[in-house]
Amino acid sequence: MHNEIHPFDGYKKLKKKHSIRFLFYLEEYVDLLKGKEKERLLTLGRLSLKNVYRFLRSRDKGKIVYGIHLIGIFHPEEQYKFLMINSNDMNMTLTAIREMHAVDDIHIKEQLIRILFKLPNISYIYISNLLVEMGSDIVPFLRQIIENRFTAPNEQMIAIETVRRLRNMDCLDLSEIILNRAQDPGVLSCWLRYLEDQKDSQQLDLIHPFIEHPNPQVRTAAIRVYLTLSDKLTAEDIVKIFNDSNIMVPINAAEIIEKSSTFPYLSTGSIEELKWKDIYKEILI
């Protein structure tokens, strides 16, 4: 870390160059430092990665994991090409992606995302959690997926959820395309949740038709974003919401309406006629 010692001079003084133990020793300090001091240690580590490169092509899973972990710490991006990821080994693939999410090369990140999309039976929320850690520089790539991959709704859902959790507004202009072209209820629901978080009231006209969508998941998401963005709540809205055939609609609506300071007037008789009157009454108490 010392300012007067060049990392290469420090490397030449090592008794056991390319020692895995030495690299793990460096790791303890890399996490504690910032700026130039951290960069000196990373440089020193990169000079000592010869054995790690061999590990990446080993048949021993343990060595591969060591290699992946250390490559993920010291970021020699040019060496990722030596990593042979077996997409049939889900645990190894997920381990590799978790360790490598912080790479600086956007092309490597895009490759990792494509690998994730091919993994079967993995929750889109779980994959989105991994993608969020990659940072906002993947948003342009995710935008392409949202805009064009209508034949792969699961990929669209992952991309939308990731953009939502990154709190990124760069995809708001895609609303008309998504809401007019998407047929999958999951995609529509994800997009409506994204709009709810962004709180863009200009989207209200696009959202309103989905309040009566045949799918309850979409209806619930649409009503949530409508109530969040709309500055008025009418008696007709209350009647429609609390007479819905699916109980999740009034439950979600109640969560948002309860935070509102104004309620439309509904007579006692009208309230008693509501299908989910007990839920509505809870708000009024």
Image (cartoon, grey):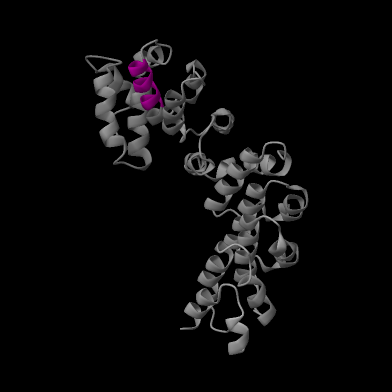
Q: Position of residue 252 (x, y in %)?
A: 54, 65
Of residue 236 and residue 178, the one placed in the foreground of this image is: 236
Residue 198 as seen in the image, left or right of residue 50:
right
Residue toward you, 267 or 151? 267
Q: From the viewer's perspective, tell me whether residue 75 is left or right of residue 188.
A: left
Residue at image position (61%, 80%) is: 273
Quadrant of res 250 = bottom right
* Part of the protein shown in magenta: 61-71
Q: Residue at x 78, y 52 (%)?
A: 180
Task: In this rendered view, identify the residue nearer to me: 283 or 204.
Answer: 283
Image point (27%, 26%), residue name: 24
Task: Name above or below for residue 176 compared with residue 130.
Answer: below
In the rendered image, the vertical position of residue 276 relative to residue 81, given as above or below: below
Quadrant in the rendering for residue 155: top right
Q: Main secondary structure of the magenta part?
A: helix
What residue sits 34% from the left and 22% below the top?
66
Q: Quadrant of the N terminus?
A: top left
Residue 213 position, x and y percent, is 71, 59
The answer to if 70 sits in the magenta stretch is: yes
Tell me where residue 29 appears, x and y as whole percent. Answer: 27, 36
Position of residue 238 measured from the top left corner of the image (x, y, whole percent): 63, 77
Q: Is residue 153 magenta?
A: no
Q: Quadrant of residue 210?
A: bottom right
Give 245 or 57, whichever is nearer the viewer: 245
